Image (cartoon, rainbow, N blue to C red):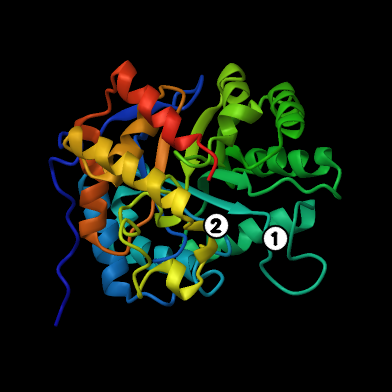
Amino acid sequence: MIESPYRPSPDRYDDGMVYRRAGRSGVLLPAFSLGLWHNFGSAQTFSNVQRMAHYAFDRGITHFDLANNYGPEYGTAEENFGRLMERSFRPYRDEMFIATKAGYDMWPGPYGNWGSRKYLTASLDQSLRRMKLDYVDVFYSHRHDPETPLEETLQALVDIVRRGKALYVGLSRYPLEAERFAFRYLAERDVPCLLFQDRYNLFDRKPETSGVLSLATESGSGFVVFSPLAQGLLTGRYLNGIPQDSRMAEGRSLRSDVLTDAMLARIRGLNDLARRRGQTLAEMALAWLLSDRRVTSVIIGASSTAQIADNLRALENTAFSDEELARINALSREEA
């Protein structure tokens, strides 16, 4: 059977997606970006990968977030994205904003991890080959390397932009003082940090308390959120215990000892508030992030088009009353 050519929805920019400016730049990003961390690699069928990517793009999600080791297996999310470029997205490349990263374990030996010039440069070259791209829109240092001089990591990012392999650079999960130094170093070399990425959700508000969110805003960087649903805790899946097919039951990135009686009470309290707002718990958790104008985009993961659709419904109501915010603060900041 010959596959019909992909033709995106002509209404993709008129279907409710909101676009936000990334810091003090000319770049607008969709309120929701599609993350390809867990469900776009070799463990997933390509037909479902394609279905989800098409569904997202058809609804105005133009930002696709990858990293060299996303899969599983390492590199396979980028390989599948390369197949998407060849089969579907090549004519629409200029409508897309594609990100990848390097900083975590990728290949054996001393040059396949952390933040050296050698690793970052080689990793991006490999990523471009896997994704069938000449350049990425933004390339991130995926984590701060405490052993490599920060100047080496940052100069590698500057040189990558100057060689045309990335249009912009980003940083992910840098501690405050490293973030401050990096913003200054990059700006002085006319390659300002476009995006700062961090874990942020109702149960993990460290970007607020550590100062990294405020510093990104003051420095003119956009702020991109990952893990907005606390790896499933804020989806409503755990309201009645631990489902057998859940990440927690399988021990995948979420430990069962997190779900204490106190945590369950907090989740149920937030769920009650969401119901009163006419939202699911997940919709409210995403809407809460977007109610902060400092947040440029929220990365959503999905294993089906239905999950993407569920997440997009959060855009229908991102306004909160003072009373609702006070209740959210009480429940989200409570000690488990």
Question: Is residue 2 depicted above or below 271 in this figure?
Answer: below
Nearer the observer, 294 or 15: 294
Residue at position x 38%, y 67% from top?
Answer: 242
Residue 62 appears in the figure: yes
Question: Is residue 8 depicted above or below 84 in this figure?
Answer: above
Looking at this view, name the residue that lies furthest to the front: 261
Report which residue position mark 1 lands on: 122
Residue 61 appears in the figure: no
Q: Is residue 190 left or right of residue 61?
A: right
Estimate how packed mark 1 is, as few (under 14), some (14 to 19) or many (20 or more) residues with alpha carbons within 10 Å. some
Task: Give how far across and how far down residue 117 sits, in percent.
Answer: 78, 51
Question: Is residue 202 depicted above or below 240 in this figure?
Answer: above
Q: In the drawing, what numbered circle is on residue 216?
A: none
Q: Inspect the image, locate mark 1, and give the three-letter code of the amino acid beneath it.
A: Ala
Q: In the drawing, what numbered circle is on residue 67?
A: 2
As helix, strand or loop, the secondary structure at mark 1 comes to helix
Residue at position x 69%, y 42% from top?
Answer: 157
Q: Is residue 178 left or right of residue 92?
A: right
As helix, strand or loop, the secondary structure at mark 2 comes to loop
Task: Give how far across and how far down residue 191 sits, in percent.
Answer: 65, 29
Residue at position x 69%, y 23% from top?
Answer: 187
Q: Inspect the image, locate mark 2, and give the three-letter code of the amino acid beneath it.
A: Ala
Question: Is residue 242 depicted above or below 180 in this figure?
Answer: below
Q: Is residue 144 left or right of residue 199?
A: right
Residues marked 1 and 2 touching at CB (< 8 Å): no
Task: Give how far across and how far down residue 111 sits, in percent.
Answer: 79, 65
Image quarter (top left, top right, bottom left or bottom right) of the N terminus: bottom left
Task: Give how far across and how far down residue 305 sits, in percent.
Answer: 22, 59
Which of marks 2 and 1 precedes in the sequence? 2
